[in-house]
Structure formats: structure tokens, C-alpha cells
Image: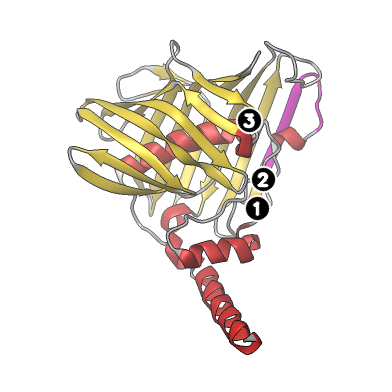
Amino acid sequence: MYKKSLIIILAMTSLVLVNCSKAKTDEEVSSVSDSTALIESGVTAISGAADDQSETSYAVMTPVKNQFDLINQLLLPKCYAASCSRALDSTCSSGIQSTSFSSCSLGSSRVTVNGNIQLAYSSSACDMSATGNTVTRTYNYSITGPRGGGVITTSSNSHSDYENNQIGGGAKITRLAAGYKMEILGKHKVFTLNNKTLFDISMHSDSANPLVFSGSLVRNQRVLANGKLILSHNLAKYSTTFTMTNLKWTSVCCHPIEGQIAVEYSGSKTGAASVTFTSCGMAQLEKDGQTEQIELSYCE
């Protein structure tokens, strides 16, 4: 019995090691669908701002697709450790915390970051414990490596979307009596691969329907109860409105693992769709009777 158990364990370990070694080839994807680009951009904008208030590592497990992925995550999570530090971990100086990145790793040795993030608080002590306290997260950084070695540039600077709307300002979080309110004031994200721009996305939250979290911002206690996020696909010239319903996270994943997003399209693309998160980094989009599998990548 012992011998059989040992053989099974060794076989499983071998599969895990092979699976871990394949992580690089799994990332070698040369394109990204419009749906994936929009969902990933929206989700990472929200997760990144929340994680920067909960002292959460950038480390991320890979999407769980089968039992071997699950074994991999349980036995070898260190395959996906991160070396980038959070701005929240820096010294507070007159209500400001900041961090700079210089080719640090972001959840994978193949994904690195360069740039900076700043947190500006309404409290000179960088405190968010009192109702009404706020923090605004601004940034300029690039992520190199996702999806076949491309470069994602991310900025909170003011810019124009395809309809010439001025968008910018980063993300603002306000402490509520019970929970938190998040406003994506404005974010711009561009993905290039082999000198070709594959997507250019602008986003901001709906001022009348900000993102509202119940409870804590810590991942395993985080629930995005409701709110709307508006994203513009500047290359394809259409916009989407994401309406969030009970998105939930887990401590080992920077992406939602449960919850739904209702999607409304306008511009060159119209209609509606729904997104359901099924596990770490995995979701399903349903539109016009068709199902698209969405696989999310990096953390922010």
C-alpha cells in the first residue's frame, strides 16, 4: 500500500513539474480577443486599486483548467511568486506613499514591470480607517511579457478616447461606514506586440453608479457588490458598460473567482452579453447564444 501511494505521489509530482515548466509556452500567445482585452483591462483596474490597499502580493496562480493545474497550485505556488513591491508598503510622507519598478517580476519570471505608482491620501498619516477618508492611486508603468512577450502600457494621465472624451485621474477609494466606494476616474491601457498595437482601451466608472465593496478590501473578504465601469475600445470604436454583481476574490488569486458582469455595447458593436467568473483567471462570456472562454493573465 505504501509503495503504491509513493508511486502515485511521484507520478503526480512529475506531472506538476512538467506543468510548471510549460508555464512559459502557455503564455506564448500572439493575439488577444476584444472581449478578453476589455474584461481583463476592467478587472485588473479594479483589482490593482483594491490590492494596493490590502498589502496583497502581485503573485497570482495560473488559471485552473484541470486537476493537474490544481495540483500544481497546491504543491508549487512558488512558481508564480512576484518581486514587485506595493506602494502601500512604502513610508508615508505627508499623505503620500509611492513605489517605483525597475524590471521587477509580476507573478511570473517572464512578466516584468517598469514605472511608478503613487497613493495620495486625504489623511496626512496615510490612514483609511475613518469614514470619509480617501486615497487616489495614480500611475505610469509598463508590463512586459504577457501574451507572447508583448508590452502593456498603463497610465492615469489625461487622454482622449475614440469619441474625444477626456479621461484620466487614476482610481479613488473612499472609506464608507460599511465597506468602500471605488471610482475609476480614468485609465488608459495599450497593448503592443511586435510593433503592432493590438488594443487601446480607455475606462472610467459611471459617476452615478460607482463601484461599491461590502466589507474589507482584503481579497478573501472582498465582494464587489455593484457598480458600473465604462470601457472604450479605441481601435474598434465601440464602448461597453460593465454592470457588476457580487464579484468575489480568493487570497491566492488577483482575479475574481465568482460573480457576474452584465455587458452592454454601443458604437460599432451593439447588443448585450454576460460574463460569469468560474475560477482563478477563467470566465465565460455569453453573447447571442455563443459562448467564449475568457482567460485572464497578469495582475496589477
Amino acid under disc 1: Ala
Viewer can see residue 101: yes
Q: Quadrant of residue 25?
A: bottom left
User: Mark on residue 82?
Assistant: 1
Q: Residue furthest bottom?
A: 3
User: Looking at numbered disc 2 in the image, what kind of residue is underneath it?
Assistant: Ser
Secondary structure under the numbered disc 2 in the rendered image: loop
Position above or below: 245 against 83? above
**Percent coordinates x, y for residue 37 in the rendering:** 37, 41
Which is more foreground, mark 1 or mark 3?
3
Work out whether mark 1 precedes mark 3 in sequence or the reverse, and give the earlier one: 1
Question: Compared with residue 186, is residue 295 higher up or lower down, i.e. above or below?
Answer: below
Which residue in the protein does label 2 denote? 57
Which disc, if any, is residue 217? 3
Point out which mark residue 223 bears: none
Mark toward the start of the polypeptide (2 vs 1): 2
Residue 99 falls inside the magenta stretch = yes
Q: Nearer the viewer, residue 93 or 221?
A: 221
Specify the quadrant of the image occupied by residue 123. Answer: top right
Which residue: 39% across, 52% down?
193
Mark whose residue sits in front, 2 or 1: 2
Callout 1 secondary element: loop
Q: Position of residue 282 (x, y in %)?
A: 42, 49
Q: Are marks 2 and 1 in contact (CB under 8 Å)?
A: yes
120 drawn magenta: no
Q: Tell me where residue 268 sits by quadrant.
A: top left
Magenta residues (range): 91-100
**Type of colouring:** secondary structure
Left or right side of 278 for 85? right
